Amino acid sequence: MKRHLLWLMMLACLQAGAQQTGPSIPLWPNGAPGSESRRAEPETVRDTYISNVHAPSLTVVPADPRHANGAAVIVVPGGGHRILVWMNEGVHAAKALNRFGVTAFVLKYRLARDPGSTYSIEGDGAADLRRAVRWVRANAAQYGVDPKRIGVMGFSAGGELVSLVADNPAPAPAPGADALDKVSARPDFQVLIYPGPLGVPAKAVQSAPPAFIVAGSLDKCCAPPAIGLYQQLTAAGVSAELHMYADTDHAFNMAQRSERVSIAHWPDRLADWLSDGGWLVPRGGRAPEGVIAPTPSQ
């Protein structure tokens, strides 16, 4: 009986999250390369975690039109490439970005360490994020997004994908590439939250976009790559900001569960950085079509 009630509570949580988001859009309508035969398989949902992803997709989480400013961020949840931490590192992050006027897109990507997986992190997971950047850029006008203000934001394993896409060379186009693959997959800015070590040291930092990096000082996994990437980027002349929080370990998410004042305010530091970088200001003082530019009173 208790297990049944717990399952109902978790289902209600996911349904509530779904009601706060927009549609889910497949990145490859005919199936991702190498996954065509499995694209119809249902995803596995346990608690608020998702696995068995074979049809990469974006879930749209639009900002309120009253203060949307045309910036967009693709959110990449973590989960060790075994699962997707869908709510805490996906939907909740997207809703936090909405408060800054940013339209968010939460990525479901293929998981290389899901039991029985035939995918790779560098070949498939990173390809899903590149495709997501291309898709948002190609469809920017539909969502009132500026195609030159598209960022990527990854947690833990998702941060590894961000680094692989933003700070490392892109692979040659795959055979059978479609028109969307001709669109640039380079993000305009990157946000890495306790990023994992894969992709660091980076191999293409000279052309990397500006970066915001945050981690905890007690995080044995992910503090070293956060510091290492920051040092690489700044040495290459790339604008980068690093926040290391004392006495803090991994997986503090968007701080909704922390009692530490500094951690509770880390999303505000991200908002400061986005504002200082000009990412929240419509270019030329005008919002893209369909977006209402904020006034000073807002």
Image: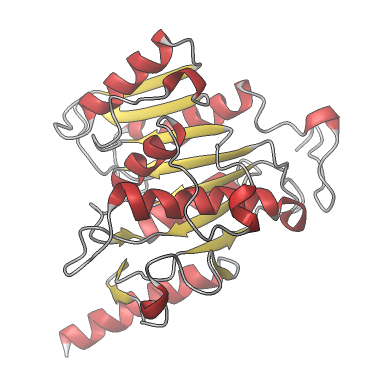
Asked whether residue 226 appears in the rendered view, the answer is yes
Q: Is residue 229 left or right of residue 172?
A: left
Question: Residue 230, relative to residue 191: is it above or below?
Answer: above
Residue 14: % across, % down: 40, 72
Q: Based on the displayed image, in which of its 4 quarters is residue 64 positioned? A: bottom right
Identity of the residue drawn at 44% across and 55% down = 128
**Residue 283 on image: x %, y %:** 79, 30
Q: Position of residue 35 (x, y in %)?
A: 38, 71
Image quarter for residue 115?
Answer: bottom left
Colour scheme employed for the rendering of this structure: secondary structure
- Taking depth in this image into account, of 145 and 123 the one nearest to the observer is 123
User: In screen coordinates, is 69 left or right of 221?
Assistant: right
How many numbered circles are shown? 0
- Residue sitting at 66 percent across and 44 percent down? 101
Q: Is residue 104 above or below residue 233?
A: below
Say whether residue 95 is visible. Answer: no
Determine the residue positioned at 77% across, 34% down: 282
Screen quadrant of the C terminus: top right
Looking at the figure, which quarter contains the N terminus?
Answer: bottom left
Relative placement, left or right, of 263 versus 196 is right
Residue 289: give x, y in percent of width and height: 85, 49
Q: Residue furthest front?
A: 175
Q: Nearer the viewer, residue 279 or 135?
A: 135
Q: Looking at the picture, does residue 157 appear above or below residue 61?
A: above
